[in-house]
Image (cartoon, rainbow, N blue to C red):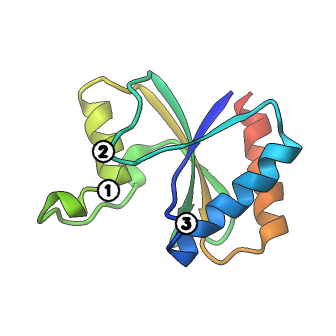
Amino acid sequence: MRILFFGNKLVEKDAFIHTLVEKLKKELPEVDFEEADGSELPAEEELNILDVAEGIKEVSLLNDLEKLSTGKIFSMHDFDLAQNLKLMKKFGIVKKVKIIAVPAGIDEKKAIDGIKEFISSLS
């Protein structure tokens, strides 16, 4: 199974996902964790994504893109992962998206346990 993950190592809240993925790679060698760019997603029917999210309290599985919040776009700099996924779905490029959302600021062990639980449900 392949899981795409996002995050800028230079931004503290984004760098957290890299820390988690390094540990998960050791615990789940059968899973292919691949760093991705939100503006250059692969054209696949199904995508599994791991990302940090705001506004949630525990690790969650999101599969309804309409529930993802998006802001107003004033320039391409404002175009984010949620908008890209919604656009890809609208054009039939992607049919199914599952996002394992990790709350910003969650305890590392709690995050890893929650992620592992959702990964086992994806297989």
For the residues labelled 2 and 3, the Cα–Cα distance comes to: 21 Å
- Is label 1 in a helix, a strand or a loop? loop
Question: Which picture quadrant has residue 30?
Answer: top right
Front of the two marks 2 and 3: 3
Query: What residue would you read off at disc 2?
Result: 84
Query: What residue would you read off at disc 1?
Result: 80
Q: Tell me which residue sits at (32%, 46%) in the image.
A: 39
Determine crowd level at label 2: few under 14, some 14-19, many 20+ residues with C-alpha closer than 10 A.
Answer: some
Q: Position of residue 29 (x, y in %)?
A: 83, 35
Query: What residue would you read off at disc 3?
Result: 9
Which label number is shown at residue 57?
Answer: none
Amino acid type indicated by mark 3:
Lys
Amino acid type indicated by mark 1:
Asp
For residue 106, side relative to residue 15 (left or right): right
Q: Tell me which residue sits at (48%, 44%) in the image.
A: 36
Do the CB atoms of the residues marked 2 and 3 lie less than 8 Å apart? no
For residue 73, side relative to residue 42 (left or right): left
- Is label 3 in a helix, a strand or a loop? loop
Image quadrant where one finds the N terminus: top right
For residue 80, side relative to residue 91 (left or right): right
Q: Nearer the viewer, residue 88 or 63?
A: 88
| Above or below 36: residue 72 | below
Determine crowd level at label 1: few under 14, some 14-19, many 20+ residues with C-alpha closer than 10 A.
Answer: some
Q: Tell me which residue sits at (41%, 25%) in the image.
A: 95
